[in-house]
Image (cartoon, coloured by chain):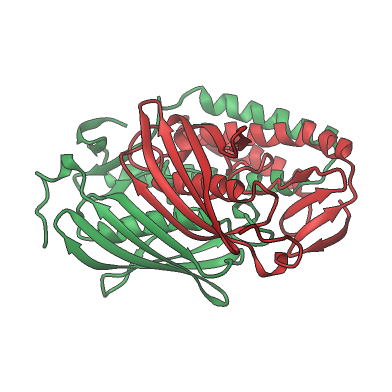
Chain colours: A red, B green
Amino acid sequence: MTSSAGFGGFHLDDTPTAEIDRLESYLVPLADSVRDLLDAALRTTVDEAGVNRARAEIDAVTARLRASQIEGTHGVHFNHEGRSWQWGNAAVGTRNAVAPPMTVRHGDDGTCFAEVDLGAAYEGPPGKVHGGVSALLLDHLMGVTASADRRPNVTGTLTIRYRRLTSLGRVRLEGRIDRFEGIKTFVTATVSDADGLTIEAEGIFVMPKWARDHFPHPS
Amino acid sequence: MTSSAGFGGFHLDDTPTAEIDRLESYLVPLADSVRDLLDAALRTTVDEAGVNRARAEIDAVTARLRASQIEGTHGVHFNHEGRSWQWGNAAVGTRNAVAPPMTVRHGDDGTCFAEVDLGAAYEGPPGKVHGGVSALLLDHLMGVTASADRRPNVTGTLTIRYRRLTSLGRVRLEGRIDRFEGIKTFVTATVSDADGLTIEAEGIFVMPKWARDHFPHPS
C-alpha cells in the first residue's frame, strides 16, 4: 500500500476504494476466523496432546502469514474518494481480532451508536463485560461522535460512571455532542445491556495541534 | 473444573494449585500462539490464495478445539490454597488472546504496577496506543490496587486525563490507594511510555452489596 501524502500519521493513500474492498473481501474473514479460534482456545478442554497439536498448526500458519507482512502498524488511511480504513484499530479494526469489532453508525440527529456482541473474551467480573472493555468502546465511540464533522480529535478527559455491571451478550452504545468550546468538544454517552442502562460517560475531546490549521473551529 | 461453592459468581474451586499449574503449562502457550497469529493475520500481505488456505487451516483447528469446551465463560475461581485464576479476563487473562496479557505486581509500599508490551493490535492513533486500551488496562490495574487488601471491588467512577499520546511498545502503569471512605476506595494511577508520563487517572471503587457482609470496612 503506497502513501502519497500524510500529516500527523494519517495517510492520504492512492489506493482506490475498489482495491480496498477487494482486499477486505478476504482479509476481514481471516480476522473473523482468528476471532473464532481465540474464543475456542480460551474455552477448550481438549487434552494436552490435542492442545499441543493445535499449537503447532497455528504456529505453522503464523509463519506462512509472516512470510510477507507490513512493517510496524497499519495506522489510519484515507483515499481521494473519501474512503478511510484503520484495519488495526483496537476497537473497530476489522482485520484486528482484539477488536470485537465495533461498527459505529451515525444517527440522523448527530448521535452515534453501536451494537456489539461481546463474548467470553471480553469478560471482567464473572459473566459481565470488563469495565475496561466498556471504557475502550466508549472512548472510541465518543471520539467518533466528537469527530462527526470530520475534524480529527484525540481524547482529553474521559469520565465513566458505572451504574451497574453490564452483562455479556448484545451491548448498545450511544453518544452525542453536548457542546463545543474552542478546540474542545464535549460528548456524552451511555452503555446499555438487555436490561437497560449500565454506564454513563462524559468526554472532552481536543483537536490536535497539527490539525488546527487544517480545520476551522466551530464555536 | 468443578466448583464446590461460590458467591457473586466468584467460585471457590476444589482444583489443587498443582493441577491449575499443569493446565496452564500447555494452555497458556496456546493463547500465546493465538496472540502471535492474531498479529500475523493483522499485518500479513500474502495473496488471496495464501490467506484463504490459512483461514481453512485455522477453522479446522478451531473445530477440533471446540470438540470439548466449557459452556459460557471462565469467571473467577479461587481454591483453598489461596490460588486464584481468571483465565478469560480481557486485561489479564493468560488464556485470552484479547488480553496483552497484563501482569499486575504489588510493590512493597501498597502500590501496584505493571509493564506491558503493546503491539500493532492495540493501536488507536497511528503508532500510538488506543486511548481505550489504556483505559482498559488502567481500569483493571486500579481495581487490583483497590482490592489489595483482598476486598472485592467493582469500578464506580473512572476519570482519565490524557496528557499526550502513548507510544506503542513498552508501557508502564502504576496505581496507589489515595484514601478510603466507607465502602468506597479512591485510587490514583498513571500510564507512562518510554518518554515519560502520558495519562493520569482517578478511580472510585465500590465494594459490591454481596461482599459487604463478608469483608469488614476499613475507614
Tell which residue pokes out farthest to the bottom in this image: B195
Task: For residue A50, say whether it is visible.
Answer: no
B167 is higher (above) or lower (below) than A191: below
Residue B129 locus on image (x, y percent)? 59, 59
Residue B23 locus on image (x, y percent)? 40, 41
Tell which residue pokes out farthest to the top in this image: B67
Position of B49 compared to B42: left or right?
Answer: right
A84 is higher (above) or lower (below) than A40: below
Position of B211 compared to B140: left or right?
Answer: left
Which quarter shows the C terminus of chain B? bottom left
- Comparing B38 with A151, the one in front is A151
Q: Quadrant of residue A75?
A: bottom right
- Comparing A130 with A144, the one in front is A144
Q: Image point 16% across, 60% down: which residue?
A: B181
Q: Quadrant of residue B71?
A: top left
Q: Image point 35% across, 48% down: which residue?
A: A161
- Comparing B214 with B18, the one in front is B214
A47 is higher (above) or lower (below) than A212: above
Residue A20 locus on image (x, y percent)? 83, 39
Which quarter shows the N terminus of chain B? top left
Q: Image point 34% across, 37% down: which residue?
A: B75
Task: For residue B155, say whether it is visible.
Answer: yes
Residue A211 locus on image (x, y percent)? 71, 64
Q: Quadrant of residue A105?
A: top right
Number of marks present in the image shown: 0
